[in-house]
Amino acid sequence: MPEYPRQIHLGVFVLGTGNHIAGWRYPGAAQSFEDLSVVQEIARIAERGKFDLIFLGDNLASEPGMHPSFAARFEPLTMLAALAATTTHVGLGATASTTYAEPYNVARMFASLDHLSGGRAAWNAVTSSGGKAAENFGRIHPEHDARYEVAEEFVDVVRGLWDCWDDGAVVRNHATGQYIDPAKVRPLNHEGRFFKVKGPLPTSRTPQGQPIILQAGSSEPGLNLAARTADVVFAVVQDLEEAKQGYVALKSRMPRFGREPWEIAVLPGVMPVVGRTEAEARATLNTLQSFVNPANARAMLSSRMGMDVAGLPLDELVPKDFPLPDTSHGFAKAMLAKAWRERMTWRDMLNLAGAARGHWVICGTPVQIADTLQEWFEAHACDGFNILPPYFPGGFDDFVDLVVPILQERGLYRADYTGTTLREHLGLERPRSRLFHD
């Protein structure tokens, strides 16, 4: 069980050119997501702010017309391996697709990262909503529910491979010459509908026992997968009451899988625009919005809505019968609900997509932003937040230096790390191998 009172968990979503679609154009902002020094500076800021983790998403098809960091970026596991050498506490999370990867390779890569980082690895198990990736793998992109059927088995295979080694398997007995106790290493011998994997990995049991599993699905299959397997869930939100309903919808499913609600941390994405005065914050957001390229905003909104929006009447209200796409249900549901609730036009939706790619935006003074985060946390709409700074490093500095101290003063957020692993930051127990102890 976690310690009480509850405390906020914080992650930071890293896009080197900023989470705002035009963040790189802000004065003093980082210009590239292919510059290791930029990401190293972000990681240093995160550790200064005592963040639980930094998170790198991924896309398997270059999309030059959407967001600069979607078009030009490093492979995330490679980048995190480099960060493992220059950080000491912050968790290191990255995406790997369950649709276009292999369970054996994913299990091995994240087990290696967990060893390299001393127990700070996290895998974001995604089904790859964008169909363009299929063309890079010679595949036909599966429909939504079919992707989740594969993901269910994929995650089980990865976790099974992590369990093929028991603790204490590496003995290094100089007297007998025995290096590994064979009784503590077993094959997985998985044969399922989609995968056949023997195992074990050539990688011993990791410092966390198993790396942390992150997920972001909000559809019915996505919620079930998260309730059964996830440790952290990233949520797309725009409204407090809807966030509370989503929080309950996920947590209430967990007992059917033999899990307790506290075993998952729900972290909605939020882009905070911080100013020392309300007018300063609004001016910053207005400046960022003035930099948005309309073509980029259309491409982003088209991706979120699962269709080309170029021909839509921009000054007409978003219709209430607009269908959910086969791509990302989470973004579409949150954005459409906001549009219907606030009587938004398609032009308003373009502005929303251009700001934070469909994520929640809050703009104000440090106290106002801290008040809002506290309200959501205490209302049990979330367990913390995935912070999406509009630009780096200044936009992240502002949150860490101005908002975090207020949360700490209120007793809502840690003053310092009390452990060294991501599992310890999240208040989760280190699991034993199910192959050996169930």
Image (cartoon, rainbow, N blue to C red):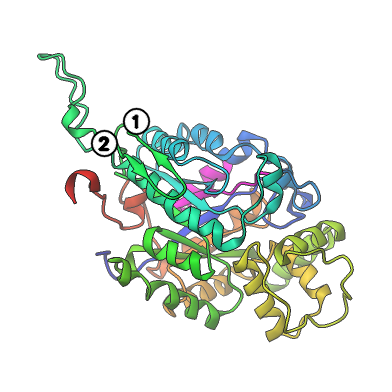
Q: x, y (%) of residue 218?
A: 53, 68
Tell me: 123 left or right of 357.
left
Q: Which mark is residue 150?
A: none
Q: Is residue 80 visible?
A: yes
Question: What residue is drawn where x is 66% and y is 64%?
Answer: 326
Instruction: Say what secondary structure mark 1 lies in.
Output: loop
Q: From this viewpoint, which residue is outermost toward the left?
A: 175
**Kind of residue indicated by mark 1:** Thr
**Label 2 belongs to which residue?**
165
Look at the image and say whether residue 257 sits in the magenta stretch.
no
Marks 2/1 in contact by CB < 8 Å: the verdict is: yes
**Kind of residue indicated by mark 2:** Trp
Look at the image and say whether residue 48 sits in the magenta stretch.
yes
Question: What residue is drawn where x is 36% and y is 47%?
Answer: 159
Tell me: 434 left or right of 175.
right
What are the residue bounds of the magenta stretch? 41-60
Total label count? 2
Q: x, y (%) of residue 244?
A: 48, 79
Q: Which mark is residue 203?
A: 1
Tell me: 319 left or right of 394.
right
**Mark 2 and mark 1: span between their CA atoms?**
8 Å
Q: Is residue 48 visible?
A: no
Specify the quadrant of the image occupied by residue 22. bottom right
Mark 2 closeness class: few <14, some 14–19, many ≥20 residues within 10 Å: many
Q: x, y (%) of residue 389?
A: 63, 57
Specify the quadrant of the image occupied by residue 407. bottom left
Image quadrant in which the N terminus is located: bottom left
